[in-house]
Each structure stands twice: as C-alpha cells, then as structure tokens.
Image (cartoon, coloured by chain):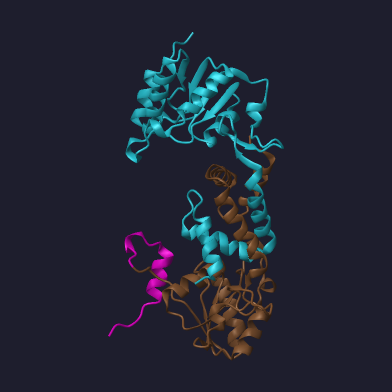
Chain colours: A brown, B cyan
Amino acid sequence: MLPERLTRLVHLFARLPGVGEKTAARFVLFLVAAGPETSTALGEALVALRDAVRPCDRCGHVAEVGADGHAVCAICADPKRDARLMCVVGRVQDLVAIERSGAMRGRYFVLGRLLSPLEGVGPDELPLARLRERIAADGVEEVVVATPPSVDGEATALLLARELARAGLRVSRIASGVPHGGDLEFADPITLGRALEGRKGLG
Amino acid sequence: MLPERLTRLVHLFARLPGVGEKTAARFVLFLVAAGPETSTALGEALVALRDAVRPCDRCGHVAEVGADGHAVCAICADPKRDARLMCVVGRVQDLVAIERSGAMRGRYFVLGRLLSPLEGVGPDELPLARLRERIAADGVEEVVVATPPSVDGEATALLLARELARAGLRVSRIASGVPHGGDLEFADPITLGRALEGRKGLG
C-alpha cells in the first residue's frame, strides 16, 4: 500500500514504546502530508543525538556529552546537591517525576531495569557493582529506594535493601498508599492495605 | 529536567498526531536508553524523505519522486486500473483501508480535508478545481464518494454530489450501516437508522 521507503519508516517508528504498526503508519502519513520541513527537522534532531546525548556516566540520567567526551547530567554536576543522599529509581522517567516533585535534594541512580523473575531478569542483570562504586565515590550515607510499588519493583527494593544495609548504609523505601486526591472508594485492596500498614501518628 | 536538545526533540515528536508532551518524552528517553543506532536509523530515514516522497501529483496518495521530478503513486501508474471509476476519500489512511479491502478497481482522489463549518473549512478550501481537472484528464465517468459517515464527511459528500452531478457524472456514496461482525445491541441509533434506510431486497 505504501512505497518501500515509507514501509521501512513505519517499522522504525513502531520500535518506539507503545507505538504499533497502525500508529506508526499514521505518523508517517502525517509527515508526508505535512511536507518535508517537519520530517526533516525531526530527522536532523534525531541524527544529532548520536554523539551529543547519552546516559550520564555517573547516575544513568540523560546527559549531554561534554567537550572532554564525558557525559555528566545537570544533577550530578550540581554541587548544591546533597551527595550523602541517593535515590535509586528504575527508569529515567521516574527520576524526572521525582525531580518535578522538588522533594529530593540528593542525587540519583538509574537502574535501567528491575528484577523480574517472570521475565528472567535476575540480580546479575542489575548494575549493582556500578551502584556500589557510585555510593563509595560519592560518600553516600542514605539510600532511598524509589522503584515502583509493583511486584518487580518490590522485589528489586528488597534485594537493594539487603545488599546495601550489609554495607552499613541507611536504606529506606518510598511510601505506598492512597494517592493525593485519590478516592478511597476506587482504590484497590492492596493500595488500601498499604495505606493502613503505613499509617502515621497524628499530632 | 532534560537537556535543551532533548526538550526540543520532545516538542518535535509532540507534533505527531495523538502524541502529547508526555508520550513524546517517553519516546525521547527510550531512544537515549536504546543507544544511538535506533535514533540515527529513524533520523536518517526521516531526513531521506525530503526529496524522495511527496503526495502523488495526480491523486494525493503518497508517492516516490521519480528521476524526472514527478511523483506518481503506484495506483495512478497502474494501467490495469479502471480510469473511468474514481473513489474520492478524505485522507490517505482511508485510501489505504479501501485498498486493503480489494473492492476498488478504479483510481482515487484524496481531498486532504473535509468541509467543516464548525472549524471554518468552506468549499473554497477543498481542492475542487484539481478534482475536476483530474476527472477530465482521466475520462472519469463514475465517482464513488468515500468520505467518512460523520457530519463533516456527509456535508462533503453532499457538496461533491451536487458539484459532480452537474458535470454529468454518476456519483454514488459508500453504504453506511452495521459493520460486519458488529452487534446490533451495541450499534448507535444513527447507524441502525442508516442500516434500515439502506436495506436491500433479498432473493
């Protein structure tokens, strides 16, 4: 139905997360109809990524590559951040969400993946050696584990707690409960159970 | 939260249909994590579109630009197509869907937009002159209007029927009714009304 060149482009778009062949075809047809300016701007920006951006050498957040060939993100480069506090997250998206909250004054470490027995991701697939190295280099004293409150996220948190507490670090886990503005009526039983377990004294 | 270069890329992705800033950011973070190969392949394919693909000079379907600078799609270039029969559609996506059905043996004409009084799209914004030209050049005798069964699609169909019937052409409209495999119980009243109006004698 489409010229070979466009079919190839559809396949490339379909590699993006959450994009199937149909959505990818919509993107491609939109770009052809929009004229060459839009597709060229997007294409050039993507090609320019090659040597300019990669995961931060220290924490795994996205970072621009400097003239010296190193990539250090804005957070790791910020001397006002508390180096003794580290927040471990699964994905860069989670880091960005936490940064937006403004509640984290330390630095981060992005695991890139979570323990997942079902998908065959074991402890050896997690960057634990790099994490320990980072903790030693920065003089970290406290680690907040901010993996998601899912089965894989909890399993990862337990593994990290065991590994890091052994090294004499204070390890904590972000709270899980009913979200701000959430309706108790529609909260699932596990969330409600956690909200009750995690209750705090008032006054 | 992201380097300037990535924020710009997020904005470019967010121009795609159905993609908001959040989805665009997910694409960008995925691409950084996936490494330069994926983003470069997509980027180069997009840049290569510039002089290689544009709407078909005849029908508006997507077409590769030939060595002579003309763009004629595979359907318009196919001599086995019945030049006397033309199917008018709103968008290339609709053309592709009809082609997939295998039920159209004529050629196409892509309007690119529909009449939309609410959005201020009047008859002057439709490529009616180009359509008439195309009809004359191909010796078209019958036009099937395959705009969608929406308010805008119906308005466009009525306009085309009036304009083209005046020129002595046979004009028809695709049938509207309960879709194949559809459940009468869940069909909306307008669809059911159309299915009844459009009933055909059996045997």
Residue appearing at x 60%, y 89% in the figure: A138
- Compare residues B23 and B171 and report the one nearer the observer: B171
The region drawn magenta spans A181-203
**Image location of residue A58, percent across then percent down:** 62, 80
Q: Quadrant of residue A190?
A: bottom left
Q: Residue furthest right?
A: B67
Q: Quadrant of the N terminus of chain A?
A: top right
Q: Quadrant of residue A154?
A: bottom right
Residue appearing at x 58%, y 47% in the figure: A36
Residue B54 sits above or below residue B197 on the image:
below
Residue A155 sits above or below residue A119 on the image:
below
- Compare residues A172 and B97 and report the one nearer the observer: B97
Q: Is residue A159 left or right of residue B186?
A: right
Q: Is residue A9 magenta?
A: no
Q: Quadrant of the C terminus of chain A?
A: bottom left
Q: Residue furthest front?
A: B68
Q: Is residue A187 magenta?
A: yes
- Compare residues A149 and B94 and report the one nearer the observer: B94
